[in-house]
Image (spheres, helix red, strand yellow):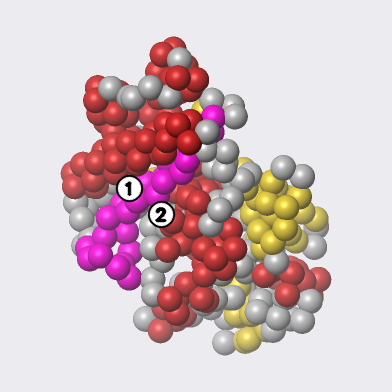
Amino acid sequence: MEFLRPGSWADALAAKAAYPDAIPIAGGTDVMVELNFDVKRPAVLLDLTRIGELTEWAPVGSSLRIGAGVSYSRLIAELGGPLPGLAMAARTVGSPQIRNRGTVGGNLGAASPAGDAHPPLLANDAVVEAHSVRGVRHIRIADFYLGVKRSALAADELIAAYWLRPASGPQQFAKIGTRNAMVISVTAFALSLHPERQEVGTGFGSAAPTPRRAVGAEQFLNAELTASGRWESRADLTPAVITRFGQLVAAAAAPIDDVRGTAEYRRHALAVLARRTLTWTWKDYATERKAA
């Protein structure tokens, strides 16, 4: 196995162009597990830990541009205010040691359906910034996932950053695992309210070949909130609306049976998580008005 450790981003892109099959590594929390269990044995590892700009984030216009190498721990500490849903997901990732090393960029690169960062990225319309020697591409998160551990990245591209708008309303993330902590999710769900454009965003993982939005559930809730005037009144949601939202989220899933859970259980759990997160986010939204 050849080990490349470029000292600049330009060198990293040149290396990826020369070795398209090279596996990028930064935190290593996914890659090293696969190496240790002999799941993968790449011919070339491309170490990105010397590329300082990957660990930077900054506001750009109305959005935040977050380097692919920003750790989960830093997301929690530095971006928990503007990106509460992603910070909630980051808190559920592994142990403190894993959160100190792991990155959303690594989650995106692996493109696993079980990645905890994917649901809040989907719920908040993230954009992935991919670089190559050919130039820069911005990929909508809804177009990024192509299949099980397959993404829209070209063979010569590396993830430089991802873009998110700061939250304009309450956000939630919840997942179910086979134990309470340090666990791969059986299923996970994220919900964001976007009152500035009167829309709802969703994302779920571990319940389809790729992370997905529950588009039908979003459309139903958007129509209900608009028709009833609840975006303005912030009146309580009816039990029927909450129940129907959960049913539509579950209907968007295409889960399988595996060692962590059955397809039937995943659908049931998604409906429960959807109802709970909707209840929590709407309560927060109503409370904001009372506080104001």
Q: Is residue 39 above or below residue 154?
A: below
Q: Nearer the viewer, residue 38 or 221?
A: 221
Residue 153 in view in this figure: yes
Question: In this figure, which residue is indicated by the disc labeled 2?
Answer: 113
Q: Disc 2, disc 1: CB below 8 Å? A: yes
Q: Nearer the viewer, residue 169 or 123?
A: 169
Check if residue 171 falls in the magenta segment. yes
| Mark 2, other Cα within 10 Å: few <14 / some 14–19 / many ≥20 | many
- Image quarter where the N terminus lies is bottom right
Amino acid tagged 1: Ala
Residue that sits furthest to the front in the current view: 291
Question: In this figure, which residue is indicated by the disc labeled 1?
Answer: 207
Residue that sits furthest to the top in the current view: 227
Amino acid tagged 2: Pro
Cα–Cα span, label 2 and label 1: 8 Å
Disc 1 secondary structure class = loop
Residue at left offset 60%, top offset 80% = 45
